[in-house]
Image: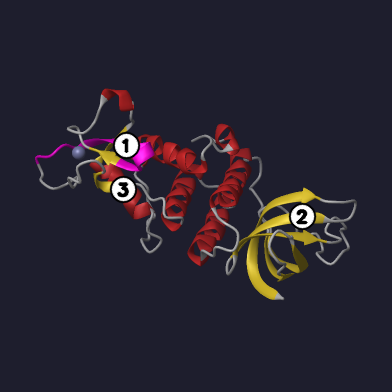
Amino acid sequence: MEKTEAMIIRVADFSETSRVVTLFSRDFGKIAALAKGGRRLKGPFEAALDLLATCQIVFLRKSTNALDLLTEAKLISRFRPPGRNIHTLYAGYYIAELLSGLTEDYDPHPELYDQATFALQQLAEDVDVRPVLLRFEMILLREIGQMPALDRCVSCDTLVNSDPQSQRHFAFWVSSGGLICSHCQRPEFNSPTISIEAAAVLTRLADPGDEFSELPMERYQEMRRVVTPAICHVLERRPKMLRFLPL
Ligand SMILES: [Zn+2]
């Protein structure tokens, strides 16, 4: 029996009474578990098994290729998007989709878990979803070891701010996971460009210890032009929720 706190990132009906839930847990990373009686309102889970709910769970770890067995889930908080804001709901689904697609079973990331629950709390306060998601995406990329190189050219290793007269804009080379200077850039790369200021903001966003409160929204679009391709590249597809979001 294992005990941990977890966020529900996917729910599927399994039989007339049971569900299979995918959870992103604080101490064990992603787990998929069968919840017997999980479809009953008055069952052992008391309707705690909603998408994006956070719960205190107890589960029985099974051997390889078998689903774990969820034996208990006590609701800590439910994700409640405010009022009529459908974007907030989709932003929550987007976080679930990224956690589901980009983390591995039994690969714990407590920091990422804390940041994911924090992002959901922020979203529930009816804020602009864009800075919340950008912060989450950067922390996720860093946590899974896919942080783009934003301080140097990935081809020749020149530091982006090695001298004040140096270039102020760099191309982003998604397949190499980083910036590329004007000497190494080729037109056929067809890369988006980003200023060194925006690249520095992204570096700060990826650091959970950096208490970043005000995102410079005038730089938002250039940051987004880098982060969306970076996410699609590591996920190996476009996230389904992207087209529903005002990013
Ligand atoms: Zn270069």
Q: Which quadrant of the figure has residue 220?
A: top left
Mark 1 or mark 2: name the one nearer the start of the chain: 2
Whether label 1 touches label 3, CB < 8 Å: no
Mark 3 or mark 2: name the one nearer the start of the chain: 2
Amino acid marked by disc 2:
Val
* Image x and y of residue 150, in percent: 29, 47
Please provide the residue range marked out in magenta: 165-178
Whether label 3 touches label 2, CB < 8 Å: no
Q: Label 3 to label 2, Cα distance in Å? A: 38 Å
Instruction: Verify whether residue 172 appears in magenta.
Output: yes
Q: Quadrant of ligand 1?
A: top left
Amino acid marked by disc 3:
Ala
Left or right of 57 on screen, residue 212: left
- The residue that label 2 is drawn on is 20
- The residue that label 1 is drawn on is 172
Residue at the limit of the structure toward the top, as seen here: 188
Vertical placement of residue 246 versus 55, above or below: above
Vertical placement of residue 109 versus 231, above or below: below
Instruction: Verify whether residue 29 appears in magenta.
Output: no
Rendered residue at 80%/61% (across/down): 35
- The residue that label 3 is drawn on is 149
Vertical placement of residue 119 versus 55, above or below: above
Q: Which quadrant of the figure has residue 227?
A: top left
User: Callout 3: 10 Å neighbours few (<14), some, many (20+)?
Assistant: some
Q: Camera-side residue: 129 or 187?
A: 187
